[in-house]
Image: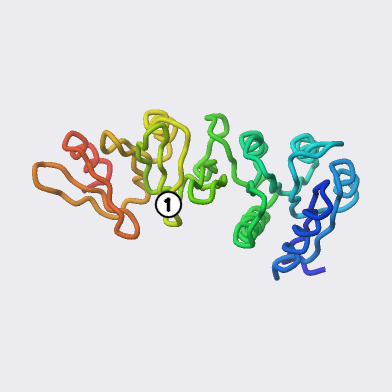
Amino acid sequence: MNSGRLTILAVDDEQTQLEDLARLLRGFPSVEDVECADGGQDALVKASGQRFDAIFLDVRMPDLDGLKLARVLKRFSNPPQLVFVSAYDTAAVDAFELRAVDYLRKPVSRRRVEESLERVAAAREQGPGGNREVGGGARGASEEEMVAALNSRYGSIRLVSRSEIFYAQAHGDFVRIVTGEGRYLLRATLAEIEQRWAPFGFVRVHRGFVANLKQAVELRPLLGGTAELVLPGEQTVPVARRHVAALRERLGV
């Protein structure tokens, strides 16, 4: 078997959805083999007898649900990467605490499955224990922590690497985060983001903006003593006058 390709276990108690997911996974050249399990107990037996690079598992299953199964799998000496597949967002936080590499909403699209497979492959390259942390807590937080955000356009949950975020912006009851790939929403306040992400290079530059200085390209002075911070793709955020001096010092300009 080609070690450069992925072996996957697909788990769902609904046969039609299981077959559809397996068929979709088998269509990718990065996938070597896909096994199927029709429930949590069946999945546990198969995962105990064979090494899988990743398990794509449903959350709501009658015998052993996806979260309970994941907690057992995490105790394996060399656990597989986890990708949750669900029609609901209710288990997203639990999934992220289990360090899942992705959380897909049913019906899943080919594009999102492809992204999940890329994350599985990247995590495998990092070796045992190398999958990036997900979740919002301070414990174990890292530069590559994954942030669970809402893609309002598709109504799905998206995992975004914090290091890839350009800036966060106050947006009503939410915080909008902006990356090179798109815009997503977090249910948080800008003050919370400022405090939690400060150790990773994020600073308040304006009443409504927290910027990732590690993504900064240029600081442009403007009339009246204000400035704007230039980020990749010529995106800019305003810098309030009272933040300009401190920002210059941090950026060494």
Percent of width and height locating residue 159: 55, 46
Q: Nearer the viewer, residue 188 or 4?
A: 188
Q: Is residue 5 left or right of residue 176?
A: right
Q: Position of residue 23 (x, y in %)?
A: 77, 64
Rendered residue at 75%/47% (across/down): 57
Decide if residue 196 is on the left or right side of residue 145: left
- Residue at (70%, 47%) from the top-left corner? 85
Among all residues in the image, which is located at the extreme left? 224
**Which quadrant of the figure has residue 181?**
bottom left
Residue type indicated by callout 1? Thr
For the point 26% across and 49% down, the residue is: 229
Task: Please tell me how many numbered marks the rendered image carries.
Answer: 1
Residue under the point 81% across and 60% down: 34
- Please provide percent x and percent y for residue 99: 65, 41
Residue to which mark 1 is pinned: 179
Query: Image quarter for residue 76?
Result: top right
Residue 237 sits above or below residue 90 on the image: below
Residue 183 coordinates in the image, percent (x, y): 43, 49
Q: Quadrant of the N terminus?
A: bottom right
Quadrant of residue 189 in the image?
top left
Residue count near mark 1 (Cα–Cα under 10 Å), binned few <14, some 14–19, many ≥20? many
Q: Secondary structure at mark 1?
A: strand
- Colour convention of the picture: rainbow
Q: Is residue 30 above or below residue 112?
A: below
